Image (cartoon, helix red, strand yellow):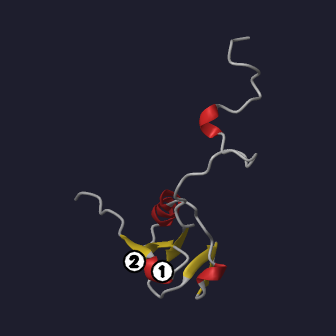
Amino acid sequence: MDDHGPMSEAPPALETGFGAGPAQPAHTPPAMKVYVRNGAGRYYCRVGLWAVERSAAFDFEQPEHASALIRAEGWQGMQIVLAYERPACDLVLPQNPLEPPS
């Protein structure tokens, strides 16, 4: 055992006072969802199912996961949508598979 006390104590940098638990970041980024959208404007839900409403869409959580599915399926004209609480803040990433060298 060292001179810093029992292992169950939180390090001083994580204490927030008033027994509130660990410190939270000063700014928490807004929640982001990651969707795949096809050229017709429909969102991927699951194998063989696409929806007009993004509330029904599958959340890939990471753009890399969405990109991996697009590449694995060989889909063309797809978009990865980084969706935030306000649609005006959405970021759309067009996806075009790379052509193999000829």
Residue in front for this viewpoint, 16 or 53 = 16
Disc 2 packing (10 Å; few <14; some 14–19; many ≥20) = few
Q: Name the amino acid, label 1.
A: Asn
Reading the image, the residue beneath label 1 is 38
At 69% from the left edge and 12% from the top edge, which residue is drawn?
A: 2
Eyeballing the image, is 44 above or below 4? Answer: below
Give me the residue at 54% from left, 84% from top: 42
Which of the labelled discs sits on residue 3, or is there none? none
Marks 1 and 2, Cα distance to the nearest angstrom?
Answer: 7 Å
| Residue 53 point in image, percent of width and height | 60, 87
Q: Quadrant of residue 8?
A: top right
Q: Amino acid at mark 2?
A: Gly
Q: How many marks?
A: 2
Residue 53, above or below 96: below
> In which image quadrant can residue 88 be found?
bottom left
What residue does disc 2 label?
Answer: 77
If you read the primary sequence from the N terminus, does the residue marked by circle 1 or circle 2 appear first?
Answer: 1
* Residue 27, percent from left and from top: 52, 58
What residue is drawn where x is 45% and y is 67%?
A: 74
Structural crowding at the residue carrying mark 1, measured as other residues with C-alpha within 10 Å and reported as few (<14), some (14–19) or many (≥20): some
Disc 1 and disc 2 in contact, CB within 8 angstroms: yes
